[in-house]
Structure formats: structure tokens, C-alpha cells
Amino acid sequence: MSYTDLHTHSVFCDGKSTPEEMVISAIDKGLDTLGIVVHSYTEFDKSYAVKLENEPIFLSEMARLKSKYADKIRLLAGVERDIFSTEVDDGYDYTIGSVHYIERGGEYYPLDWSADRLTALAEEHFGGDMIALCEEYYSLVSKIPEKFTPDIVGHIDLITKFNEGGVLFDTASPRYVAAYRAAVDALIPTGALFEINTGAVSRGYRTSPYPASDIIDYIKSRGGKFTLSSDAHRAENIAFGFPDFEKLL
């Protein structure tokens, strides 16, 4: 079976491999389509996002690679746009919509940095109520269509990155379930694909992809469609775990 992987990152943002290294790896793995994306620019955190002056360079390089490898693989240039991104992202083939931060008092707090920072955020701004933090997260996810229309919804339950085995909060909580369902309901009308993202598995944070199986079931019940994504930041992790997790589709 051939695969499509539309969520990968290169050295043009926080990835470790060049776009051409990513392309060669995808060809070697027999993919029929590869998408390489940049994180859209965020003024408050420039550490992981594409530099504004590098966007045309990235798109030019992707155009070169599309031509060079046209007989071997279909290539697409995408942008992963955070809800707090401020730039208008033109010239890309598709957009992934994601939420990586919570904003409080003009400060932006990353949700996928570490378990300690996530629990500290809950203590400082949510009275130690992790489910309240989850509710805020999913509220932001539900607002993505108010800012832009994504082609793909990125790692919809990113808030669970450090919650393997329910160590931080209970995903069976009625409040948690209501929160993610409201987000799914808001996104379904966009027609966006929901990604089954194996990135946290390849990096050792989880044993199963985003989203959790109950969220997958709810998306299916609402008529949502899926795509497998690796969220690879290195060439070797392209299409990571796809043969194992394709059954989730």
C-alpha cells in the first residue's frame, strides 16, 4: 500500500532535515504524496516558526523539488497555522489548523513543552483544575474556523501529549468529553480532514497516535474524514507507524 503524509517539518522551521532529505526518504519509503509544512510565524515565539524572510525561499525550494522529482512523487508545500498566528499565509498548497498555546494576560504558554510546564500552567491560571485547562484548549480549537478554514485539523487532542495512562487528568470526565465534542462539532462543517498523527509516538511520549480512539469514534459518527500524518521533524520518521495505525482510518 502506498501512503500520503501531509504533516512533516524541515529545517525551514523546527525540523532537522532539509526538504530534499525529506523527499528522498519519502521516495525510498514508497510514498505517493509528501507534504512539507512550515509553522506559521508567531510574533511572540519565533523559536519554532518560519522566519518571514525565509517563506519565499521555502516555497522556491519546494517548487524546485516538485519539478526535480515529478516522476517519482507528488510534493505539496503547506503551512501549519496556529490560531495565534498573525500572518496571512499565501502561496501554500494547503493549511493545517492547530493550537499550541494558551494565552493569559498577554502571555502565551506552550502546551506541548513538558508535563511540568503544563501542570504549572493549570496551577497558576486554572486553580489546579486540569480539566478547566482542557476546556480552554478545546474552546480555542473550536474557534479555528472563525479565523481561517483549515484543510487539515492538526493533532486535535494535543493537550494529552503528556497524559499517557491518565496521569494528569481523566479523559472520561464528562466535562472533558463535552469540550472535545464541541470542538469537533465546530470543525466538521469546514470539511477539513482530521489527522491521525503519529508524531508523539515516534518521539516516545505516547504509545498511540492523536487523537484518542473515543475522539476518532466521535469524529466518525459526525461524518468526519481522516488522514494519516507523521508530524515528522526528521527524514527517518516520515510515515512513522502508518502500517500499524492505518486500521484507525
Image (cartoon, helix red, strand yellow):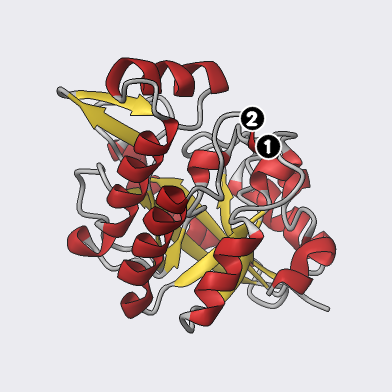
Q: Tell me the kind of residue under disc 1.
A: Glu
Q: Quadrant of residue 23?
A: bottom right
- 189 and 181: which one is in front? 181
- Is the residue 111 above or below the residue 183 in the image? above
Q: Tell me the kind of residue under disc 2.
A: Val
Residue 66 can be seen, yes or no: no
Give the labeled residue for mark 2.
167
Q: Quadrant of residue 109?
A: top left
Q: Are marks 2 and 1 in contact (CB under 8 Å)?
A: yes
Secondary structure beneath label 2: loop
- 55 and 7: which one is in front? 7
The residue sitting at 28% across, 26% down in the picture is 108
Q: Is residue 72 left or right of residue 1?
A: left
Circle nearer the viewer, 2 or 1:
2
Point out the image quarter for the N terminus: bottom right
Q: Is residue 63 left or right of residue 199?
A: left
Give the labeled residue for mark 1.
164
The residue sitting at 37% across, 17% down in the picture is 123
Q: Position of residue 115 (x, y in %)?
A: 56, 22
Q: Position of residue 237 (x, y in %)?
A: 75, 47
The residue sitting at 74% across, 58% down in the picture is 239
Q: Position of residue 48 (x, y in %)?
A: 43, 31
